[in-house]
C-alpha cells in the first residue's frame, strides 16, 4: 500500500487510500468527518490521515445506510463505540440487534402498506374521505384543509 504513514505505532492512511479501500468517495469521507462519524489526524502539511480502524467504521456506516438507517442514528451509535479501536463482532451484534428491531417495524409497515395498496388498486376509488390507504376513517379531516402527511401506523 503506497503512502502509508506510521505515527505512534499506528498506520495512518490518506483520504485516497481510505476511499480506494472502502469504495467511498473522498467527498463522502469528508462529509462523514464533518458529521462526527469518523475522525482523522492532520499531517504536518495539514492533510487528512486516517487510522486503519476507520475502514471498519466506514463499512458499518455504509451497511447502515443501505438498510435505510438515518445518519443521525448511525452517529449516535458510533459515538458509543471506543474511538481508538476497530468495532468488534460483539459491537456489531449489539448494533445489528438494535437496527434489526427498527427494520422489522419498517418491514411490517411496508407489508401492510403493500397489502392496502393491492386493495386500493382493486377498489379504484381513491376517495380522499374514505380511502383506507390515503385517509383511513377520514383521520386527516380533523386537521382541517391542506396537505397532510399520511402516517401508516
Image (cartoon, rainbow, N blue to C red):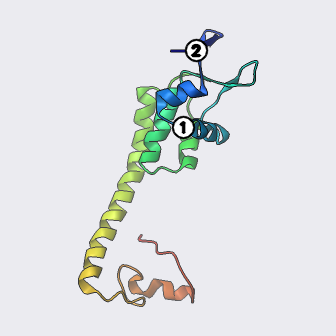
Mark 2, secondary structure of its residue: loop
For the residues labelled 2 and 1, the Cα–Cα distance comes to 19 Å
Q: Looking at this view, is 83 or 60 the one in front?
A: 60
- Residue 56 visible in image: no
* Residue 74 position (above or below residue 42): below
Pinpoint residue 62: horizontal percent, then vertical percent.
Answer: 47, 40
Position of residue 107 in the picture relative to residue 71 (left or right): left
In which image quadrant can residue 125 be found?
bottom left
Which residue corresponds to mark 1?
Answer: 25
Pinpoint residue 43: horizontal percent, then vertical percent.
Answer: 72, 20
In which image quadrant can residue 88 be found?
top left
Q: Residues within 10 Å of mark 1 (few under 14, many from 20)?
A: some
Q: How many marks?
A: 2
Pinpoint residue 124: horizontal percent, then vertical percent.
Answer: 29, 86
Pinpoint residue 40: horizontal percent, then vertical percent.
Answer: 65, 27
Badge 2 vs badge 1, beta-carbon distance below 8 Å: no
Q: Residue at x 54, y 15 (%)?
A: 2
Which residue corresponds to mark 2?
Answer: 4
Q: Residue at x 34, y 58 (%)?
A: 107
> Between disc 2 and disc 1, whose residue precedes?
2
Q: Residue at x 46, y 31 (%)?
A: 91
Amino acid at each position: 500500500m503506497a503512502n502509508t504513514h506510521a505515527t505512534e505505532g499506528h498506520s495512518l492512511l490518506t483520504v485516497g487510500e481510505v476511499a480506494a479501500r472502502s469504495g467511498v468517495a473522498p467527498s463522502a469521507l469528508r462529509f462523514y468527518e464533518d458529521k462526527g462519524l469518523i475522525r482523522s489526524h492532520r499531517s504536518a502539511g495539514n492533510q487528512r490521515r486516517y487510522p486503519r480502524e476507520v475502514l471498519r467504521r466506514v463499512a458499518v456506516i455504509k451497511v447502515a445506510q443501505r438498510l435505510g438507517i438515518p445518519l443521525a442514528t448511525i452517529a449516535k451509535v458510533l459515538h458509543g463505540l471506543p474511538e481508538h479501536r476497530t468495532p468488534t463482532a460483539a459491537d456489531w451484534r449489539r448494533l445489528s440487534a438494535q437496527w434489526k428491531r427498527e427494520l422489522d417495524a419498517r418491514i411490517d409497515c411496508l407489508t401492510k402498506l403493500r397489502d392496502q395498496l393491492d386493495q386500493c388498486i382493486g377498489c379504484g376509488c381513491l376517495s380522499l374521505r374514505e380511502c383506507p390507504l390515503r385517509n383511513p376513517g377520514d383521520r386527516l379531516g380533523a386537521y382541517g384543509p391542506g396537505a397532510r402527511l399520511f402516517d401508516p401506523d
